[in-house]
């Protein structure tokens, strides 16, 4: 087992990895950029190293600086978390060349599955259905134009490296194509350090289903069932759940075995996620392999009881997976909601700034993976994710109710967040019915986006309720939560407390 691991990331995922390290008796080394010198994740580390200025390219995407920090710290391994360099084969290769274990697939497998085009070609050879599209990368717009004409519009432009919806653009006609390719290239370059994009046919109204897989260095492979990831905004997942309401046991088994087959064909080891699209006729297509721990991994942990980050570290250290496929069961239902510093009433613009007050929910079946604290300045340089709220219960209906209550009790004052928006998703009939697809957000936009015109009415009701409660000496209960699904404190955004 390793004695020391450097965590090449920030925020909640850095804290999550640190906790797994500490349970294994491994020292955790944290890194930070200039703007992150007071970040929450540093409080959990056994040692910390500055890796550059605030821009991602000068710090969290700076391979040389990260390797130098790992060497200086005496770390034997590097955990990349998600995002940044997590799926960068060059980074994995440099780690290997410097005697550092990359906690993930080796550079050869990462080159294959991390490159979405190469992985499509590989899985097609072993009989897994893929979405029609490019088989090779093409820098010439004519290649995109020809493929779009061949498969038919609409099409989707996607980053070949990385994930998280970065670099994706839906294109519905030829006039939009060139600008969409260029925009995708810019975003991919900024997020992953690689501007390669490709094109494939866009499937209308699909379900987005992914399977969590583990494979060790001895050839043992298991899947840990599926996660439903169809609640997305601009191709970015915001709510995930497991089990999926779209799968029966036969389809679940077939997709799980296909996911294992994909991982074996790629020679992949460690934790990985095989993603599929499920169309309206219940046919599934390989989408991509995410060669890292996923943002939504906690819901799998909640229903299986298996610590995925711990498994990542054990596999990287050469240990065998000690669980068989028949030993793994889904128990209950889990949901995750991603909390972002963004303004749903202003086109979801990122909202950096100081958190003046923070109250995180707690209670049975509630987990918060958080990277923030009261008084912290949320920087503008990185993805605006603040934390993840995860709930578990014996059944889906109770889990939804638990998530709705937890979101109502999650208070962040000082910056705008999507807390109220997420609660409205939970309370939407199409979500509670489980009959939804990747266009859920677009089709329910009017119900999900609360008009600013409602704020005076909400504040008036809150003031009246407080006044009545003060006279009677009772707890405030006068606001109808079904009609007003968030508190004024969540909706108002920036506050300033002034002295006299």
Image (cartoon, rainbow, N blue to C red):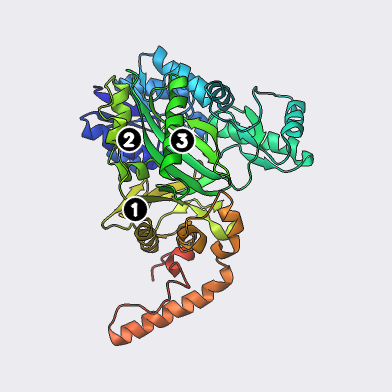
Across and down, in percent, residue 351 comes to 51, 53
- Determine if residue 457 is in view: yes
Q: Is residue 365 left or right of residue 270?
A: left
Extreme-front residue of the structure: 250
Label 3 belongs to which residue? 255
Which residue, given by chain and number where applicable, does mark 1 sit on?
391
Q: Position of residue 432 (x, y in %)?
A: 46, 60
- Mark pair 3, 1: CA separation: 25 Å
In this rendering, would 315 be left or right of 180? left
Q: Is residue 17 above or below residue 355?
A: above
Q: Position of residue 320 (x, y in %)?
A: 27, 22
Judge depth for marks 3 and 2 and give the one in front: 3
**Along the line of sight, the residue nearer the viewer: 33 or 410:** 410
Name of the residue lying farthest toward the bottom = 471
User: Which residue appears at 65% of the width and 22% of the height?
Assistant: 136
- Which label's residue is closer to the chain start, 3 or 1? 3
- In the rendered image, residue 358, in percent from the top left (x then y), is placed at 36, 58
Q: Where's the C terminus, which quadrant?
A: bottom left
For label 1, the crowd category at 10 Å Cα-Cα, with few meaning under 14, some 14 to 19 and many 20 or more, is many
Say few, some or many: other residues with alpha carbon within 10 Å of mark 3 (under 14 / 14 to 19 / 20 or more): many
Q: Answer yes or no: is residue 35 visible.
A: no
For mark 1, give the secondary structure. Answer: strand
Distance between the alpha carbons at the discs numbered 3 and 2? 20 Å
Label 2: which residue?
A: 308
On residue 370, which mark appears? Answer: none
């Amino acid at each position: 087992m390793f004695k020391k691991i450097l965590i090449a990331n920030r925020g909640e995922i850095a804290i999550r990895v640190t906790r797994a390290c500490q349970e294994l008796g491994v020292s955790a080394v944290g890194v930070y950029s200039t703007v992150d010198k007071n970040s929450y994740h540093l409080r959990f580390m056994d040692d910390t190293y500055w890796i550059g200025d605030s821009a991602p390219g000068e710090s969290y995407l700076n391979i040389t600086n990260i390797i130098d920090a790992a060497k200086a710290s005496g770390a034997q391994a590097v955990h990349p978390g998600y995002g940044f360099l997590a799926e960068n084969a060059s980074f994995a290769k440099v780690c290997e060349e410097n005697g550092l274990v990359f906690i993930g697939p080796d550079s050869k497998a990462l080159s294959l599955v991390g490159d979405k085009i190469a992985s499509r070609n590989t899985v097609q050879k072993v009989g897994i259905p893929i979405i029609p599209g490019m088989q090779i990368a093409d820098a010439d717009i004519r290649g995109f134009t020809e493929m779009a004409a061949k498969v038919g519009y609409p099409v989707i432009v996607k980053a070949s490296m990385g994930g998280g919806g970065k670099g994706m653009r839906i294109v519905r006609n030829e006039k939009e194509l060139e600008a969409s390719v260029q925009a995708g290239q810019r975003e991919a370059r900024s997020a992953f350090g690689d501007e390669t994009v490709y094109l494939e046919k866009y499937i209308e109204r699909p379900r987005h289903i992914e399977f969590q897989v583990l494979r060790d260095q001895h050839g043992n492979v298991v899947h840990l069932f599926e996660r439903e990831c169809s609640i997305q905004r601009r191709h970015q997942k915001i709510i995930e759940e497991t089990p999926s309401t779209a799968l029966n046991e036969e389809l679940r088994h077939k997709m799980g075995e296909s996911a294992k087959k994909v991982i074996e064909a790629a020679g992949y080891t460690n934790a990985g996620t095989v993603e599929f699209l499920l169309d309206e006729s219940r046919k599934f297509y390989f989408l991509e392999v995410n060669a890292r721990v996923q943002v939504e991994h906690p819901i799998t942990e909640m229903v299986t009881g298996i610590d995925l980050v711990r498994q990542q570290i054990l596999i990287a250290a050469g240990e065998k997976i000690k669980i068989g496929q028949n030993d793994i069961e889904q128990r209950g239902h889990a949901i995750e909601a991603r909390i972002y510093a963004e303004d749903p009433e202003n086109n979801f613009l990122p909202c950096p700034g100081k958190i003046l007050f923070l109250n995180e929910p707690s209670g049975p079946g509630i987990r918060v993976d958080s990277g923030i604290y009261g008084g912290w300045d949320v920087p503008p340089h990185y993805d605006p994710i603040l934390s993840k709220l995860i709930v578990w219960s014996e059944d889906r209906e109770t889990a939804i109710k638990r998530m709705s209550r937890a979101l109502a009790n999650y208070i962040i004052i000082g910056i705008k967040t999507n807390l109220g928006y997420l609660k409205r998703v939970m309370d939407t009939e199409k979500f509670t019915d489980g009959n939804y697809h990747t266009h859920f957000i677009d089709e329910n936009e009017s119900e999900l986006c609360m008009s600013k015109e409602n704020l005076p009415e909400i504040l008036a009701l809150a003031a009246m309720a407080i006044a009545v409660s003060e006279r009677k000496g009772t707890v405030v209960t006068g606001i109808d939560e079904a009609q007003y699904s968030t508190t004024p404190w969540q909706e108002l955004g920036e506050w300033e407390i002034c002295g006299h």
